Amino acid sequence: MTLRLHDTAARAVREFTPLRPGQASVYVCGLTVQGPPHVGHVRAAVAFDVLRRWLTASGLEVTYVRNVTDIDDKILTKAGEHGVPWWAWAYTNELACTRAYDVLGVLPPTYEPRATGHVPDMVMLMERLIERGHAYAADGDVYFDVRSFPEYGALTRQRVEDLEPAADTDTDDRKRDPRDFALWKAVKPGEPETASWPTPWGRGRPGWHLECSAMAGRYLGPEFDIHGGGLDLRFPHHENEQAQSRAAGDPFARYWMHNGWVTLGGEKMSKSLGNTALVDEVVRRVRPVELRYYLVAPHYRSTVEFTDAALAEAGAAYRRIESFVHRAAERAGRDVPTRLPPAFREAMDDDLGTPAAVAVVHEVVRAGNTALADGDDAATAEALGAVRGMLGVLGLDPLDPHWAAGGGTDDRLAGVTDGLVRLALEQRQAARARKDYAAADTLRDQLTALGVQVEDTPQGPRWELTR
């Protein structure tokens, strides 16, 4: 296999060799469901969806796990502020996350475990760590002893001596070292009883880092291929995951991949800064497929600045591709064999080089448009097969059932829209037949004002959305 991926731990691009021939195991950190997701949140989901699709296209059977963190200090706080049970708050926002994944064409994971469903796995992991001398209990809390594990800091190449205290609890007086991090947090006065579970050390709830190690081990085993997540998770989350899992005796992830941030006004998009763009709101302004194109086209490790101008530019670029696919399908049919050009394969094998891969898509689209203009049906079909093959890997094929209804809109609404536009086109054709060109031009101008572009072809008029 020629796929090469950037491994954060190695600080280099490495050839990807699966742990098990013919298979790939991937764990991606999902969202903490403290609120609805913004565009920055879903970039990771889209980036690793492309990875998954490319692994599959490369002939591997992929097991893809993305967790849900449904218990957390912030969830408890926000639920209390809104006067609702914490589990209701978490589930409402979990549904919002699922809605965002679905609307952007992210494939469902093989498994999507919730943290609250895996407390027994967490308890067993803590028991192993305590037995090995890497964790200790103190007044109901359980902490990881960072100084007991010489490899701590290896993922992000930091020394324990240089680290700030772990800011994950307000009980640092119980720690042997302020840099020790919480595996388990004892229940506090005033917290809902439903937000705690019994353990040998008393009732409490898990620390964030413990959850992912336990769930990755449950579904992928002690060693797996790829662990992914956003750049902001490298430290402390992923550093702590690796430390606790390896200290317990598990090799854990063989490759670490991290996607870049989405920024707004030059700052990382985050709820704490208040500079968010909620997915539910953005997809009211632009089609979901265009938002996906906007997130897929840059390299997954690059920083993306979120602006309306950039969204509009991405939408226009995607519509050029979409226009060719629809026109070519009308000429060649939808069932032409798909293929992946060598240049596209080379780009994707080079650390998921989507900028170069998207450039290949546009290059083939230009050639396909020339073939359409020349009436070369064979070349048109060949270009269509290549474009659809590449777009399938990127999750952007306009003829995919997910997008065919207009980018996640209701099928009935799409059908009504198509019927109304075709009715207007029939009226325009009738006006032209009776040589009432003023009326025909007026109908075309009215459609244009609504964002409907009309093209007259030898097969009759066809239409597409321009915005």
Image (tube, rainbow, N blue to C red):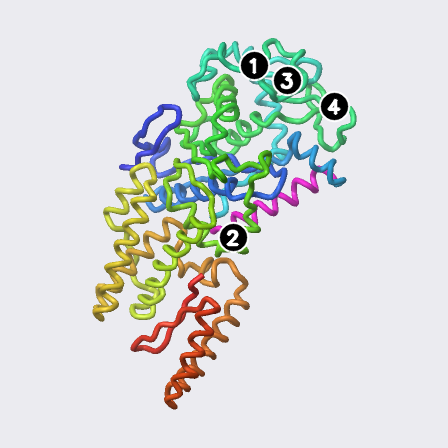
Is residue 88 located in the magenta-colored stretch of the structure? yes
Position in image of residue 237 (x %, y %): 52, 26
- Tell me the CA gap for discs 4 and 3: 14 Å
Q: Quadrant of the C terminus?
A: bottom left
Mark 3 and mark 1 residues within 8 Å of each other at the beta carbon: no
- The 10 Å Cα crowd at callout 1, few under 14, some 14 to 19, many 20 or more, is many
Inspect the image, locate mark 1, and give the three-letter code of the amino acid beneath it. Answer: Arg
Residue at numbered disc 3:
142
Circle nearer the viewer, 3 or 1: 1
Q: How many labels does the image show?
A: 4
Residue hosting label 4:
188
Dots 4, 3 in contact, CB < 8 A: no
- Magenta region includes residue 60: no
Determine the CA span between mark 3 and mark 2.
Answer: 40 Å
Question: Which residue does the numbered mark 1 point to in the structure image?
Answer: 179
The residue nearer to you, when weighing 325 against 133, is 325
Image quarter of residue 193: top right
- Identify the secondary structure beneath mark 2: helix
Q: Residue at x 57, y 22 (%)?
A: 125
Packing grade of label 3 (10 A; few <14, some 14-19, many >=20) is many
Compared to residue 335, the image places residue 83 above or below, namely: above
- Nearest the viewer among 166 and 273 is 273
Q: Give the range drawn in magenta.
A: 85-105
Mark 1: secondary structure: loop
Kind of element beneath mark 4: loop
Give the number of the disc on residue 103. Answer: 2
* Mark pair 3, 1: CA separation: 13 Å
Task: Say whether disc 4 or disc 2 marks the residue closer to the N-terminus.
Answer: 2
